[in-house]
């Protein structure tokens, strides 16, 4: 997320420098500049999305999820790993064609894992996905949610990588 009203340098200059350096990181511009020429300029310089303040936080979160999906090469709505299918738009999960009921935090955690399938995510990274800034996080909250996901979806889906974090396996492990 890039605010155009930065204290030392204009955000459009930062965006131009990022794109000139061929950095492909998705950029969502979040700004109070609402004129059509400003939006056109931001998108033409290389913004992947342009959102004008004030913005509904649910819309902003949905736009960020869409950017992450595209960045991970998953423009389609559903995410799949092993026998689990997650539909972010419907906030639904199925395993082997059967609906699975998850809490909000479990769903968000599973979505973070599925967007990063076969990559190790640290506990800190998972906490950032689950909790907004300034929220108190119980010391074992992530572990509790992972335990619940394993109970509901099976133990083979999410693996513990000792001393590092956790990883969701896109394909079932071979016996």
Image (cartoon, helix red, strand yellow):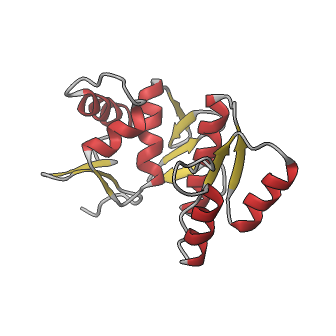
| Residue occupying the point 26% across, 42% down | 123
- Which residue is at the front of the view, 35 or 8? 8
Q: Quadrant of residue 18?
A: bottom right
Q: Quadrant of residue 52?
A: top right
Q: Position of residue 151 (x, y in %)?
A: 31, 31
- Which residue is at the front of the view, 144 or 20? 20
Q: Is residue 99 left or right of residue 112?
A: right
| Residue occupying the point 79% across, 53% down | 38
Residue 124 position (above or below residue 169): above
Instruction: Judge whether residue 21 can be spotted in this image.
Output: yes
| Residue occupying the point 41% across, 57% down | 117
Residue 86 position (above or below residue 57): below
Q: Quadrant of the C terminus?
A: bottom left
Q: Position of residue 99 (x, y in %)?
A: 54, 31
User: Hey, which residue is sitting farthest bottom in the picture?
Assistant: 21
User: Hey, which residue is sitting farthest right in the picture?
Assistant: 36
Instruction: Judge whether residue 102 can be spotted in this image.
Output: no
| Residue occupying the point 41% across, 58% down | 170
Q: Position of residue 165 (x, y in %)?
A: 23, 49
């Amino acid at each position: 997320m890039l605010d155009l009203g930065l204290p030392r340098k204009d955000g459009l200059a930062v965006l131009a420098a990022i794109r000139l350096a061929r950095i492909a990181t998705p950029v969502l511009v979040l700004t109070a500049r609402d004129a059509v020429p400003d939006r056109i300029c931001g998108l033409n310089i290389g913004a992947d999305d342009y959102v004008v303040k004030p913005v509904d936080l649910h819309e902003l979160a949905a736009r960020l999820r869409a950017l992450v999906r595209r960045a991970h090469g998953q423009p389609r709505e559903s995410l799949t790993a092993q026998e689990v299918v997650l539909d972010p738009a419907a906030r639904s999960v199925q395993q082997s064609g059967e609906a699975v009921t998850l809490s909000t935090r479990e769903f968000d955690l599973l979505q973070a894992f599925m967007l990063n399938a076969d990559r190790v995510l640290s506990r800190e990274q998972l906490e950032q996905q689950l909790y907004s800034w300034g929220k108190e996080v119980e010391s074992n909250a992530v572990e509790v949610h992972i335990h619940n996901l394993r109970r509901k979806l099976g133990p083979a889906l999410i693996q513990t990588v000792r001393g590092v974090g956790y990883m969701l396996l896109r394909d079932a492990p071979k016996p």
